[in-house]
Amino acid sequence: MLYRTAGQFKTSYEADFALFPVKQDSILLAAVLVLAFVVFPLTANEFAFRALLIPVLIYALAALGLNILTGYAGQLSLGTGAFMGVGAYACYKLITIFPEMNLLVAIALSGFFSAAVGVAFGLPSLRIKGFYLAIATLAAQFFLVWLFEKWAWLYNYNASGAIQVPNIDMFGFTVAGPRAPAITQYYFVLIVVSIVTFFAINVTRGRIGRIWKSVRDMDIAAELVGINLMKAKLSAFFVSSYVVGVAGALFVFAWRGAAEPNLFDIPLSFRVLFIAIIGGLGSILGNFLGAILIVALPVVLGFLPDVFGVPISSSAVEHLNVMIIGALIVTFLIVEPHGLARFWAVIREKLIIWPFPH
Amino acid sequence: MNVQVRSDPFTARDGEIAKGGVLLDVRNVSLSFGGVKAVTDISFDVLQGEIRAIIGPNGAGKTSMLNVINGFYTPQLGTIIFRGKERRSMKPHEAVGQGIARTFQNVALFKGMSTLDNIMTGRSVMMRRNIGWQMLWHGPALAEEIEHRRAVEEIIDFLEIQHIRRTPVGKLPYGLQKRVELGRALAMEPSLLLLDEPMAGMNLEEKEDMSRFILDVNQQRGTTIALIEHDMGVVMDLSDRVVVLDYGKKIADGVPDVVKADQNVIDAYLGVPH
C-alpha cells in the first residue's frame, strides 16, 4: 500500500527517464539523504563517525568502482586494493608537491593516475576472460604493493616507509590530517561519495552502461551490434579504476590518516570484492548495503554484549563476531544469491502489489 | 520506397542504390578452416529491396557465408562488394558501421538486460554523447536518449512487444526472444539485414507472425533481407530469389519456382542413389 504505483502515469520519455520514476523511491532517497546529511551529524559521536559512517561510505565507494568493472562490464578483478593504493599515493604526492592544491582537486586528479594504471593492467582483458583475467589482475595487486614498498620517492623517503597525511585546510575547514574533526571529514567524504554515486548511476543507465552490460552478457553479440570491444572493456577499466582510486585517496586522507604499503594488500581487495558480491553485482545500491553489512555490522555487534550487560571477554566477542558475520553472509547468499540489492528489489516488488500475491 | 526522411524509422538508410540495383556482390568467395573447406568459390548477389534466401542441407556453409558477409570470418579467396565498396577483411563492428545487421541461429541477446535496453543497445553506434554529458544525464545526453528511445518505441510497437518492455530478456519465452533479437537488429537501421534461421524452433503461429514481420520490414522500411531458413514453405513464399548451397558449393540460384524444380536441389535434399 505504501508502495502503490497506480496512478503515477508518465506522459513523456523525459519523465520516464527520471532517476526515480516511482514517487515512493524518491521519498525514500530523500529520507536517507536527510538522515545522512542532517540526522547523523547531529547525533553521532566521534567514534560513530570514525568507526561506522566514514568507513562505510569509503568502502561503498570502492565497491562501486569494482562493481562498474565486475558487475556491469563483467571483467573480474582482484586488484582493487592496489588500485586504491595508487589513488592514495598519487594524492599524497600531489599534496606534497603542490601544497597549495585544493584537496578535492587533488583527489579528483589522483583518480586519473589509478585509472591509467587500471587501463594498463586491463589490457589482458582483450585476450582473456573470467578467472584467467582475475589472475592477471592479481599480478597488478602484487606488483603495485611491491612498488609502494620499494619506490621510496612515493613516500618521500620517510624512514618509516609509510605516508602521513598533513593537516589540510579547505575553505577554512581542516578536512584532513591529525587536526581534522571527524564531522568535517564525514561531510567531506559524504559529498564526494554522493557526487560520484550520482555520476555512476547516470553513466550505468545510459549508452555507456548498456555497452558495458552487453559486453558482460554476450561479447560476440555485442561486437556484432557494432560495439568496439576493446574500447568498451578499457573504458570500464578506466572508469572503475578512477572511482577505486578516488576511494583509495579518501581511504587514507579522510579516514586512516596514514598508510603503509601492506594496507593495500590482497585482504583489502577481497574485502571490497565481498562487499560488491554480497551487495549485488550490477547494482549501485548494493554497494552501500554490502558495506553496511561487512563494515558496520561487526562494529555494532561488538557493542551488543556491553549494551545488554552480558559479561563476555573482548576476545570472545571478536570471535563471535567473525562467526556471526560469516553465518549472515552465507544465509544471505543462500536466500538471495544475487545479493542484498536484489533482496531489496524483491521486497519492493512485493510491496508494490501488496496485498495481492501477483 | 526510397524517400529520404531520416527521422522516419520506416525508411531505409541509404537512397544511393535504387531498388533492384546490386547492394551486395559476393564474388568467388572461398573459406576454409585448416583442411576443412566451409565455402568453395561461391558467387551471388543481393539486390536492393529484395528478400534473398540462402538454403541448403545442414553443414552446407550457410552460416559461414553470413559470417563472411558481416565480417566475422575473413575469406581466404574472393571479394565482397557492399554498396559499391570492395573489402577483404574487416571487423564485425566496422560491417555494422556500413549498415549490415544480423540475428543469430541461437538467440544471442543480452540476457541480463531488459527488452528496452537490448533494443537500445542496437542504437549504440548512432549515439555520440561522451561520458561527460552522460554523467550529468542532462542536456544533449538526455535529448539523444529521448530521440533514440522514440525510434526504439516505434520498433517495439511494430513488433508488438510493448508488454515485455521492462522484462529481462532471459525470462522471456523463446519466440519472444527471437522477436526482441529482430528488434535489436532493426534498431541499427540496417540497409542489409541478415537473418540466421529466424523461425527455427517456432510453432506455426509464431512462424506466421515472424513471416509477417519480415515482409513488413522489407516492404514498409525497404530493408534488404538475406535469410537462412529450413522451412521450405516459408522460404518459397517469402523470398524473391533463392541461392542453394550444398557441401560449400553453390548448386542453384534463382526464383523459388525454378529452384524448386532444379534436379540438383532435389538431389541435395532427398539424396541420390549411388
Image (spheres, coloured by chain):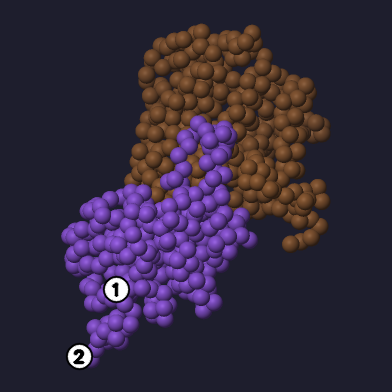
Chain colours: A brown, B purple
Image position of A44 (left or right of B194):
right
From the top left corner, tell me how far across and down residue B128 is, in percent.
Answer: 45, 39
| Disc 2 residue crowd, few under 14, some 14–19, many 20+, Cα 10 Å | few
Mark 2 lies on residue: B274
User: Residue sitting at 69 percent across and 23 percent down?
Assistant: A49
User: What residue do we see at 49% from left, 34% from top?
Assistant: B131
| Secondary element type, mark 1 | strand
In the drawing, what numbered circle is on residue B243? 1
Same chain assignment for discs 2 and 1:
yes
Q: Mark 2 or mark 1, which has the lower sequence index?
A: 1
| Residue furthest out toward the bottom | B273
Q: Which mark lies nearer to you, 2 or 1?
A: 1
Mark 1, other Cα within 10 Å: few <14 / some 14–19 / many ≥20:
many
Chain assignment, label 2: B
Q: Are marks 2 and 1 in contact (CB under 8 Å)?
A: no
Helix, strand or loop at label 2? It is loop
